[in-house]
Image (spheres, rainbow, N blue to C red):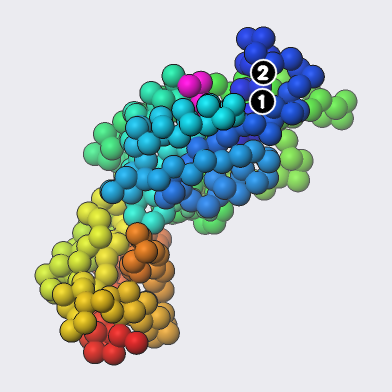
Amino acid sequence: MITAREATLDRLVVQGSIGSVVIDKRKYKLVAYFSDQMHSSGQKAAKVIGCKTTTVPAGNDFRLTKQALEQAVAKNREQDLIPFFVCGTFGTTNTTAIDDLPGIADVAQKESLWYHVDATYAGSALTCPEFRPLAAGSERADSFNFNPHKWVLTNFDCLALWVADSTHLVNALSIHREYYPKAEGDTAFLPLGRRFRSLKLWFAMRMYGAEGIRKHIRDDVMQAKWLANQLVADGRFELIVPVVFGLVVFRIKPKALSDPSKVSHANTALIKAINDNGRVLLIGTKLNGNEVLRAAVGSTFGTQKNAHLLFVILKEQAAKAIIAPE
Ligand SMILES: *Cc1c(COP(=O)(O)O)cnc(C)c1O
């Protein structure tokens, strides 16, 4: 976001829209755009760099749409603010929704916004060719990240960031000092006491190979789909969104309860019962005000046995939650 900010302000100076002396003041007019399904790290980054944010409501299927973004940008322009950054998500944290990436690219291009694609979780699936069409539009991003620690068998933490044009990043973050090595651009990437994260990823790649990584992803997606099918077949659960990657978002359905208005209570009780039980960890979320459960398949040594165990525990605890939803 710092790079986006500097690139925007540099451009405005070059265009003569603002003079360099007023840059500092204009900084407070910069606005970044996120959907309401965007991970909290976006808001946190905005706090760190001190810019405004506009949260754009996602559509019914939890995707950020082109139209909603356009409207938000137009409104802020009327308020004399400076839109400078938009983040599209490939696989949101709540539901693995995929924003309208080509539509966001159109708006970013038209409005001169820096376009970042957050593919932190689902980006790993792009190692498999069959998932790549889902990310259409992300090739138009200015920057793209995914976290190998989420799903590429790499220990926490490791984030891979790609930028389309590294000159902005180098310009934004380079500070030259005599005691630094001379190579151009190095200072932008030089925290001196740096951890060597790429080595972990290199080992994972050498150990599993491209095919091993793809197999891991595909096995996990199969297990997630298996679990989803079992839940639906059981009759007491409903899926909130279709399973695309390794995340199953579901809940006890209102019809399974004698009092359907108690559905959020029952699902809160179910999450608590499962986690108190201690054999699996399940983290829920709220979608449109409703409590839902999220089962993520993706650990390094997870197998079909784990998915099976989860289903057994879910059935056993759901029975209790349905009888006593309070
Ligand atoms: C997990 C996640 C993040 C944050 O990743 P960290 O592992 O905490 O660095 C950001 N965005 C999305 C979409 C995520 O799923």
Q: Which residue is mark 1?
A: 6
Q: How many marks?
A: 2
User: Which of the 4 quarters of the picture holds residue 270?
Assistant: bottom left
Where does the N terminus fall, quadrant-wise? top right
Q: Is residue 137 left or right of residue 22?
A: left
Confirm whether residue 183 shows in the render: no
The amino acid beneath tag 1 is Glu
Q: Residue at x 16, y 75 (%)?
A: 255
The amino acid beneath tag 2 is Asp
Q: Residue at x 18, y 84 (%)?
A: 258
Q: Is residue 293 left or right of residue 153?
A: left
* SS of the residue under disc 1: helix
Q: Residue at x 41, y 69 (%)?
A: 283
What span is colored magenta in the figure?
111-115
Q: Residue at x 44, y 20 (%)?
A: 109
Q: Position of residue 147 (x, y in %)?
A: 48, 47
Q: Position of residue 315 (x, y in %)?
A: 23, 81
Q: Position of residue 301 (x, y in %)?
A: 38, 65
Residue 290 numbered tag: none
Where does the C terminus fall, quadrant-wise? bottom left
Tell me how far mark 2 sits from mark 1, CA to CA. Answer: 6 Å
Residue 308 drawn above or below residue 189? below
In the foreground, 207 or 137? 137
Residue 134 drawn above or below residue 248? above
* SS of the residue under disc 2: helix
Q: Position of residue 84 (x, y in %)?
A: 56, 28
Residue 245 drawn above or below residue 178? below
Q: Which residue is mark 2?
A: 10
Q: Is the C-beta separation of discs 2 and 1 under 8 Å?
A: yes
